[in-house]
Amino acid sequence: MDLYELSREDLIEYIKTKVSDYENSDAFSNAQVGLDYYKGKQLIDSKLRLGIGEGGKLVPILNVPNYRIKDNQYAKLVDQKVNYIFTKKPAISSEDEGFQEVFGSFIDMKLLRTLNKTAYQAYNCGIAWWYLSLDEEGKELTYKLMSSREIIPLWQDVHHEKLQAVIRRYSKEEWDSAAKKIRNRAYLELYTEKEVMLFDVTNNKYELINNVSYIRKADSAYSWDKIPFVYFKGNDIEQPLLMRVKSLQDGINAIMSNFVDNIQEDPRSTIMVLKGYDGQDLGEFRHNLAQFGAVKVIPGEGDVGTLEVKVNSENYKAILSLLKEKLIENGRGIDAKNDRTGNQPNELNIKSMYSEIELDANKIELEFQASFEYLQDFYKRVHRIATKDYCQITFKRNIM
């Protein structure tokens, strides 16, 4: 569909539909969850201690320990993967040695630092984005890492390899001189092959502000004839890394929190065993036992015994060790504490330790190499390079 064939009203409705579809998609929610888990905002934050109340219903218990302990193995996994492949300047090779030398100067430490941040977004959100433009003098190609959650791609194909357009939603604070206060305004930009359309979408009203050209020289407007966005996928299905290991990360947090809860319940390590219970409802008995550690008995007829409950730390250790092992295995990371190398490490054993992360690194390297080919088309146009060759980007591993 050609967006320029739509009327202004139809184009706005089309954009609204795409924005709504994206905001209600798994891709949008998964990207936010991936970022949250990396920063430490996880499911364990909402943990409650529950007991059986009246009528057999679960109710929160407020006067017992309720620790929310996080062992953020997911963040460690992301750091491990990013630093494994994106901390050293990549090797560049091309059959056109002149182009290799020119483009090699473009791959500097500033770009490497941006690439490192890009990999974090690709792993946490599934896909990361660069916006390409010219510098103020109009002589050099520049790049900017965008927020993945601001970008809504409109793809031309089911494999998500070619862009038809890009929507960017964002908000920013602006000074309202009339009201003498700061207001938050929302904007939307539609990037096509020809131009950028800027809308004010505050209060969900789509008001077209301006049509902006990509390049202006001597009062003339030019376009790239391509969408100046480069996507960097973490994998071919754009799946955040967290989706492989979320349940395992949640399990690690739950096991550690429950273990500390049980350790801290010293006054309740002995449970009362009663005869002649002074109560009518079984739910009331369970609730009193859970909340107070004791219940009333009928005077003269009741008897009290004790049942000691011991916390077996070895069980917790075994489950915790298994969960961490499976998180590394499913996330395809490195277990630096494993015993593959044995007492006599050799090259074969060390390579075996890196086998899982190497497979995953190969996949993201392939995706990033394809993205750099697309970027090079813009670079050639800016620098008026006529060669049909591309530079091959090979990322260097940070390996033992």
Image (cartoon, rainbow, N blue to C red):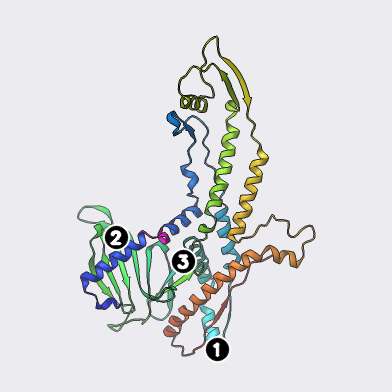
What's the residue at 56%, 72% (across, down)? 365
Disc marking residue 96: 1
Horizontal placement of 239 versus 81: left or right? left
Position of residue 264 measured from the top left corner of the image (x, y, whole percent): 58, 32
What's the residue at 56%, 51% (across, down)? 248
Of helix, strand and loop, which one carries label 3? strand
> Can I make out residue 152 in this image?
yes
Of helix, strand and loop, which one carries label 1? loop
Q: Nearer the viewer, mark 2 or mark 3?
A: 3
Residue that lies at the very extreme toward the left in this rendered image: 178
**Kind of residue sitting beneath label 3:** Ile
**What span is in magenta?**
24-28
- Residue closer to the observer: 47 or 229: 47
Residue that lies at the very extreme toward the top in this rendered image: 300
- Residue indicated by mark 3: 127
In contact (CB < 8 Å): disc 1 and disc 2? no
In contact (CB < 8 Å): disc 2 and disc 3? no
